[in-house]
Image (cartoon, grey):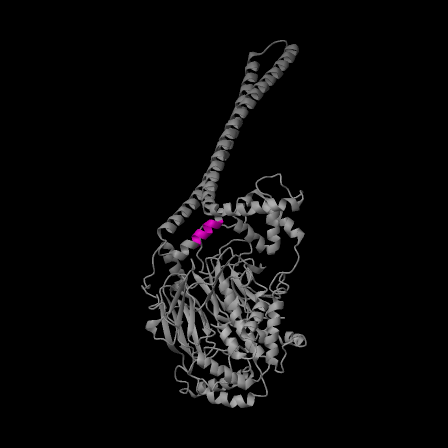
Amino acid sequence: MPVFKVPFNGYSVKFSPFYENQLAVATAQNFGILGNGRLHVLQLGPTITERAAFDTADGVYDLCWSESHDSLIVAAVADGSLKIYDLSLPPASNPIRSLHEHARECHGVDFNTVRKDSFLSASWDDTVKLWTVDRPASVRTFKEHAYCVYSAAWNPRHADVFASASGDCTTRIWDVREPGSTMILPAHEFEILSCDWNKYDDCIIATASVDKSIKVWDVRSYRVPVAVLNGHGYAVRKSCLASAALPLCFQHDTKVVLDVGKMV
Amino acid sequence: MAAQADAPASSADQNPQNPVVEQTTVDNRWGSKVEDVKESYPSSVFVNSQPIREEQVQNAVKFLSHPKVRGSPVIHRRSFLERKGLTKEEIDEAFQRVPDPTPSVQTTEPVVTNQADVQTQVPTQVVQSNPVLPAGSASKLVTDSRFHWSYAILAVGFLAVSGAGTLVLFKNAIIPRLKSWIRKVASEDEEEEGLLKKNNGKPNIAEEAAAAAKVAAAAAADVAEASRQMLTTKSEEKKCFEELMRLLNAQVHELKSMRTAIQMLEGGRSTNGKIVAEQQDDNRFLGTSSMQPYVNGKTVLGSHSVRSSSRPAPADPSVAPHPKSYMEIMAMIQRGERPSNIKEINDTPPNPNQPLSNPRLAPRPKPWEVSQPQTNSTNILQTQESSESSNYKFPSNPLSGGDAALWWQRKNVRITEFEAGNENKPGSSNVLGNEQPARRSWVPPQPPPVVMPEAAAAIRQPNKPSYQKEQTTDNQLLAPSPDVTDELQRITRIPEAGGTMEANGKTSVLSTSDEIQAEENSRY
């Protein structure tokens, strides 16, 4: 299996929605505690080659590809800013935008796959902000969580609905047309690090927490989880419901574990 | 895209109802999308529709009425209730019911009449409590520490007083007892003597002396025992004192460490932003320990995102060991050192107004967004698509590795089938640009923000008055959300307006797609 070793510690990996063998990796120095960051763009092939790399002053915690532009990447940086990179421009012209509104680290970023023009940023300053690529300022700020928001995820079918996972042990579901959150899921007893929607059933959401478990919820009856997946040895840092409706989980020690849990 | 994904079931349901039904299923999807936009708002799945649970509200009211809870910031109270599973409505209802500083207003009074008062009071209370929050938390720390000290002093004083009191009591109790006992013994001896006298008739001095000596010895023994007891109690008291001092020292240590942490916080703000803030957070939470019992104010800087892995509850997930280099870096940072491998990097954009480049590809549908591919025009289009797939602008060498290229092209063929299936989707896109004008015959689903919707409408429906058309679609979509900001309205409305207008105006697939092509080219 081809291997590409990045010099820093990895934080996030995303494939490009336009090119199947192109992916981007967000990395941070010194385990992301304190140090620089780098965004790699890799090309898969018989070997993995690096197409581009962008250095940042602070660690890059998350990234997302634009759904409408094949060469745009949005990176969430630990100094609270969002950097937008354009791969079709030479590296000297990058980043093309730096959106700095968050007061604390920016931990998660997600692009809207339905509307394809807007993206969310989740930050440790307890807020989620909505942005579009063409504006220098955020469109909306969602401030309701009582602690850091670790990730935000758009609903794959409803263009206005998204979920946010926070360190105040709740997951909230929002509608951008509403001023506040529409649902509050007290999903875990400890901090929730990640949430993701089931792409094939827009009412199923999975949350991953510090308590090493992943819980799957149906928002229509959210008092009891649909499934509880234990078995990780560390806190579950990221989970995403893949196309086969099986959760793919990243453990905290950066191993990739395919956790085959039976889902209803 | 959302329409297509809104379940074929919904489109099937609305087929007979939709007055704009065309032969192709595509238009159904778009038409049903408009219906869904209207319908999904009032009956959205993502809204909690359960009624307010009175029991939960009453529990919340009891919680909020607790004096200790009253002193905590509102956001913590809300967070606690949310974690207990209350919905927003229940929490709001509880906040409304909880009386303000006047204790006379109880829940027994009719809630309706007082709700108006309480509602006005609650926002002011919230406003007042929020600015007090940082000061309150700081002062709480101080008051907590003061509490501890005063408690300690009180305890010491109490112990001292009790020790002295027991001493005095002992003395007062023992001495009279001793005396009475001596007297009793003496009197017994006297009685004995009397008996003896009666019996013997002659007081024996030696016997008297012996008896007196015995009594004295007994008294001395008693005194010795009493003093021994006093010594033991003293030693016990000493032990208690020492234990107390030990505990106090431990407290002092903790407070000292907190103080150093605060100093680090103020001193090392520039470099250790994250850790500092974390400590700040922990201190903030420590101040309101009534609701969230945290073991120690020391921040265990576990991993970054796992800030609270040291948070205590008894079911705390045990922290697994971390690699050695990670612990080294953590130790370095905690000592305040900056790791040596950090470079100064300027990552600001060289040109913040750099215009975005034109995208070279159109957005592709996601695997979960595909319903069924079209059968009529697929054959025609497939050939076009497959010839075009080799013309995809690909950044590096796609044909170098044989396997890789083949795999990629095979995948593209599969995807072009899907794309052909969606080629009926309306939508203009600036993605096309000038590079691939006529070869692409399918149009990506979601249009970008249309600059002049009236112009687009006018071009597409020359027969109907375009302004009227715009009005109706706008009214349809305007109904639900008056609260949303103007910008957001524009963003949400315009793509949908663009999409629906095209859906309604479309007659046949190929001709209109060509129209759109031409129109796009003319626009861009």
Dominant SS of magenta comes to: helix
> In the image, residue B263 lies at what x, y percent?
37, 48
The N terminus of chain A appears in which quarter of the rendering?
Answer: bottom left
Residue A233 visible here: no
Is residue B504 rendered to the left or right of residue B403? right
Residue B114 part of the magenta segment? no
Q: Picture quarter containing residue A66?
A: bottom left
View extreme (top): residue: B201
> In the image, residue A39 lies at what x, y percent?
39, 70
In the image, is residue B427 above or below residue A205?
below
> In the image, residue A28 lies at what x, y percent?
39, 66
User: Which residues lie in the magenta part?
Assistant: B278-285
Counting labels gives: 0
The C terminus of chain A appears in which quarter of the rendering?
Answer: bottom right
Residue B372 visible here: yes
In the image, is residue A201 above or below residue A186?
below
In the image, is residue B473 above or below residue B68?
below
Is residue B136 rendered to the left or right of residue B55? left
